[in-house]
Amino acid sequence: MTVGVRVPLRLADAHGRVATDLRVSLTDRCNLRCGYCMPAEGLPWLPTDEVLSDAEVLRVLGVAVRQLGVTKIRFTGGEPLLRRSLESIIAGAKQLRTHAGDTPELSLTTNGIGLDKRVSGLVAAGLGRVNVSLDSLDRERYAALARRDRLPAVLSGLAAAEAAGALPVKVNAVIMRDHNERDVVPLAQFCLERGYQLRYIEHMPLGPQHVWDRATLVAQAEILALLGERFELTPAAEPRGAAPAELWQIAPDGTQPGGLIGVIPSVTAPFCAACDRTRITADGQLRTCLFSRTETDLRGPLRAGASDLELAELWAGAHGRKAVAHGIGEPGFVPPDRTMSAIGG
Ligand code: SAM
Ligand code: SF4
């Protein structure tokens, strides 16, 4: 008689992709109201009892890493710094071991407000690095985009992240027509001078209705043209792989040291074919794609007593049905009902 050896589950889909990178949203709440993400009046927040508790988050992370081969965890939201227990969640995640026996890579996507006071504690708990969202260095334009006058707090957060060794510090900037195209070059200059890795993100149809319009999208080609007026750019040698950003090398000159810069062209050159992501919302819903219109409930089975293996099988089954691509721009494309803040960016 042969003794059955259980083959470890993976988040494999029918299109040859395997997800190993988990985005977990810790809250749908936020202290900014970025126009591309949230309406000015905010959104109805999830009731507290619908949000996964710390223990439930750690249970889900354990299933992802131990059972399903996830190797990277990014904490996001809403604004993940609004989760008071973020340090202890990170410390718990740090105890996990991947199939290869390593600690999973732990990172945070944040608007940076309050990061100055917390980043050293977060790094001590096990956080590896941060991505800070910063769309303008001009205080008035920042306040107009985020609908809150908080630029100084974000800049303090960035400096503190660097000082705490959460390296490399990454900066995300969404560029919107008639709002912040003139920030493209200053943001690059700012990041190059400090050694931060800047990624421009194409505006995606994931915010309040009627905000996104293909005609007003500032596409990768236009962002590169704006950069090209000021810098000497060459495509970076590194292959894009599963990384969403396309990278360019900026040559040093008398005013800046040069470095890599990226664009995440999710609309004009999507990276769906190489996607290695899986997502959990703050209320424990599994999404195989940012643009999914369906979710798989993990919270219900988890609270009803499902075992780790049962949760893993549910998760893996959903990934088996992952769509081949998001289809923005194709006839019939319908954006998801939740905004980016509620999904977890
Ligand atoms: N609050 C945190 C922050 O702003 O970094 C984390 C959550 S936020 C939803 C994650 C990322 O999504 C941010 O970099 C934000 O700029 C980006 N984002 C939100 N809505 C977007 C949209 N409609 N198109 C492109 N990026 C978007
Ligand atoms: Fe908040 Fe981030 Fe959305 Fe801005 S992008 S409203 S900071 S969740």
Image (cartoon, grey):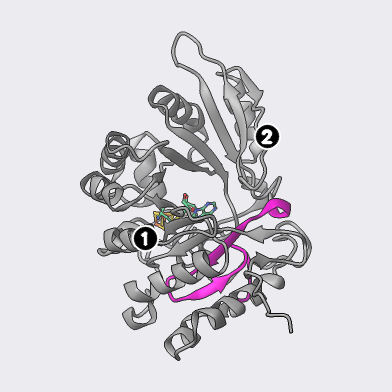
Q: Which residues are magenta?
A: 272-295
In this image, 63 relative to 330: left or right? left
The residue lying at 70 percent from left, 54 percent from top is 272
Residue drawn where x is 43% and y is 64% of the image: 25
- Kindly report which numbered mark, 2 or 1, lies closer to the viewer in this rendering: 1
Q: Position of residue 273 (x, y in %)?
A: 73, 53
Q: Quadrant of residue 249?
A: top right
Let me know if residue 53 appears in the view. no
In the rendered image, residue 311, in percent from the top left (x then y), is placed at 54, 80
Q: Is residue 310 above or below residue 123?
A: below
- Tell me what residue is drawn at x 64 percent, y 27 percent: 236
Instruction: Tell which of 18 and 284 is nearer to you.
Output: 18
Residue that carries the numbered disc 2 in the rendered image: 221
Give the CA separation, mark 2 to mark 1: 43 Å
Secondary structure found at label 1 = loop
To which quarter of the image does residue 325 belong? bottom right
